[in-house]
Amino acid sequence: MSSHDHLVIFLHGIGASGAQLMPLASSWRAGLPNTRFTAPDAPMNHRYGHQWFSTEGNPLDPANVLAARRAFDELMDDVLRREGFAGTHDRIAFVGVSQGAIVALDAVASGRWKVGALVSFAGLLPPQPISSSSKGTPVLLVHGQADTTIPAAASTLAAATLRAAGFHVRLDVEPGVGHTISSAGAAKALSFLKTSLL
């Protein structure tokens, strides 16, 4: 059992590593006391780092996400055991960026992970049946209007799809922001986690 009340798990983008998201954790620590932060490396190798699913062929093929589910779930289970949060999914939050946001959205929308909160930066929801069993997980979608990697329309569509399944969703499309986490977006996410993880 962890001495902390909550655990925030950062899920990095393709070709990156968990360590690259830890500066965000440092900036959030004061606002989220009694919270542990962890940023595992994705289970698959990528020529520039790590990836959550293969992008061979069509990089957004839903089959690639489906094929990576088991490795994602096993890694998250390992993280929860290591951090002392096994069996307490309601006390954890997923914070994903780009490919990390895609697997986080898939994990919740499929009903596999009923976590305490989900933040998606510049992500998308793979086309799939949505399970309402995770609809208790509040979701924040933050997306740059100027994103040319994954268009902001992807988060707008994800918001509509999740809301139709009964999820409580906040959508924030940021003018002039590209495929990144802006300082304003990070602040919105921190505020959202403060209220969602209570």
Image: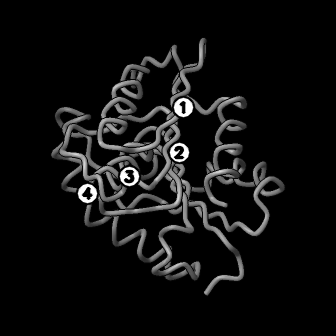
Q: Nearer the viewer, mark 2 or mark 3?
A: 3
Helix, strand or loop under label 3 = loop
Q: Nearer the viewer, mark 4 or mark 2?
A: 2
Q: Is residue 73 above or below residue 4?
A: above
Q: Which mark is residue 189?
A: none
Amino acid type for the residue under numbered disc 1:
Val
The alpha-carbon separation of the residues under discs 4 and 2 comes to 20 Å
> How packed is label 3: few (under 14 Cα within 10 Å), some, or many (20 or more)?
many
Helix, strand or loop under label 1 = strand
Q: Does the image show residue 45?
A: no
Viewer-proximal residue among 94 and 14? 94
Quadrant of the rendered structure where residue 26 is? bottom right
Helix, strand or loop under label 2 = strand
The alpha-carbon separation of the residues under discs 3 and 1 comes to 19 Å
Looking at the image, is mark 3 or mark 4 earlier in the sequence? 4
Quadrant of the rendered structure where residue 158 is? top left
Q: Which residue is mark 4?
A: 68
Looking at the image, is mark 2 or mark 3 earlier in the sequence? 2
Residues at discs 2 and 1 in contact (Cβ within 8 Å): yes
Quadrant containing the C terminus is: bottom right
Q: Which mark is residue 142?
A: 1
Q: Nearer the viewer, mark 3 or mark 1?
A: 3
Q: Which residue is mark 3?
A: 135
Viewer-proximal residue among 67 and 195? 195
Amino acid type for the residue under numbered disc 3:
Lys
Q: Which residue is mark 2?
A: 119
Residue displayed at 30% across by 66% down: 71
Q: Is residue 156 above or below residue 37?
A: above
